[in-house]
Image (tube, helix red, strand yellow):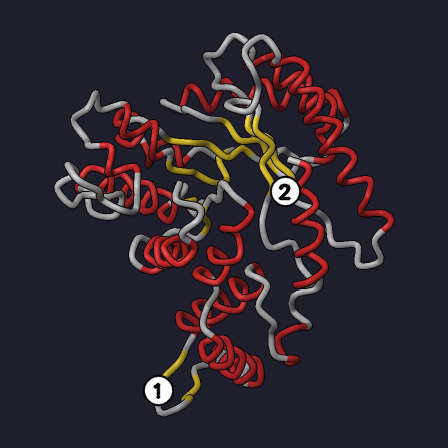
Amino acid sequence: MRKSLALQAEMSQEFGACVFDVTLDCEDGAPVGGEKDHANMVVTLANHAQEAIKNIASGIVPRIAVRVHPVDHPVFEQDVNIIVGGAAASLCHLMIPKIETVADVDRAAQLVDHVATRTGRASVLPLHVLIESPASVHRAFEIAAHPRVQSISFGLMDFVSAHGGAIPSSAMSIHAGPGGDGLDQFSHPLVVRAKLEIASACHAHGKVPAHCVVTEFNDLAAVQAAASRAARALGYTRMWSIHPSQIRPILAAFAPPEQEIELATHIMMAAVQADWAPISFGGKLHDRASYRYFWQVLERAHQTGRRLPAEARAYFPT
């Protein structure tokens, strides 16, 4: 966790923006029986990282989140009371795993809001949720419609395990090995269907779809190829990493190409000069529909640490 926070600070200075979130894990990271101590350690780390920013000239705010235990776990309330109660001002969001229903989101939101209000946090603490079962995929659109959900992540390994062996283990991987019938996480029909349902639900309700992990963290070319497929074929706008070495390949895959950034800048500047009326650019018609797309290209470039042309840079202060 400390290494991840240090890398976030280092790359923020390099790119001039915070280009990835750090999620401190209490669900799988805490030893059984040591949940309370682990939660208190997470609070200390989150608060220290936010305090340290005051000593950095750039003032780029770190994005730190925490994954707590599921809402039906015995220590869920303890997690929220310790973590939100002790670090509400330091968190960009709270990650709730194994969400099955809208009622689970309601329960989480009520407790989080109660504790956050008690701390004096001025803004609502966003919730990111993990969908990890066939039943929750079925309810993806209902969950995405919840006003407190900011992002939905796909929990690949739990999803595969929830099928009781009906999906081969190769579907947890990006390399379909022997016995998997050539079916990996990008080709098994049930896995691909789940990914598409989640991405579609998020886009329908203006939420952020976050793609699952790639466990082969030493194969960086494969990680970047998987991230590219997640972004360009499946409609995901974020992706989890499980190792620091994966971050740069994922950023590269999710970043727009340089020529698209340049084109977006020229079109947006021409649109501003035309007061957002339709224009002809490069022999093609552009209006507010395409302006919105090219503005999103510039946003994505900024979020992935790509250097923007001077004309566009002013729209994205750190």
Q: Is residue 237 left or right of residue 176?
A: right
Say the numbered circle drawn on residue 230. Answer: none
Pointer 1 local density, CA inside 10 Å: few below 14, some 14–19, many at least 20: few
Mark 1 residue element: strand
Q: Earlier in the sequence, mark 1 or mark 2?
A: 2
* Residue 274 horizontal/vertical position (percent): 53, 84
Q: Is residue 128 above or below residue 20?
A: above
Question: Which residue matches tag 1?
Answer: 284
- Determine which residue is flagged by label 2: 4
**Farthest-out residue, bottom:** 283
Residue 26 x, y percent position in the rendering: 57, 23
299 or 64, which lies in front? 64
Q: Position of residue 165 (x, y in %)?
A: 19, 24
Name the residue located 44 percent from the left edge and 86 percent from the top edge: 279
x, y percent for residue 50: 77, 40
Q: For the residue carrying disc 2, how many other residues have a C-alpha within 10 Å: few (<14), some (14-19), or many (20+)?
A: some
Does 279 sit above or below residue 181?
below
Query: Spatial distance from mark 1 to mark 2, Cα to Cα?
Result: 45 Å
Quick check: 183 left or right of 47?
A: left
Figure quadrant of the C terminus: bottom right
Give the amino acid at mark 1: Lys
In what element is the residue under mark 2? helix
Depth check: give the residue in front, 30 or 21. 30
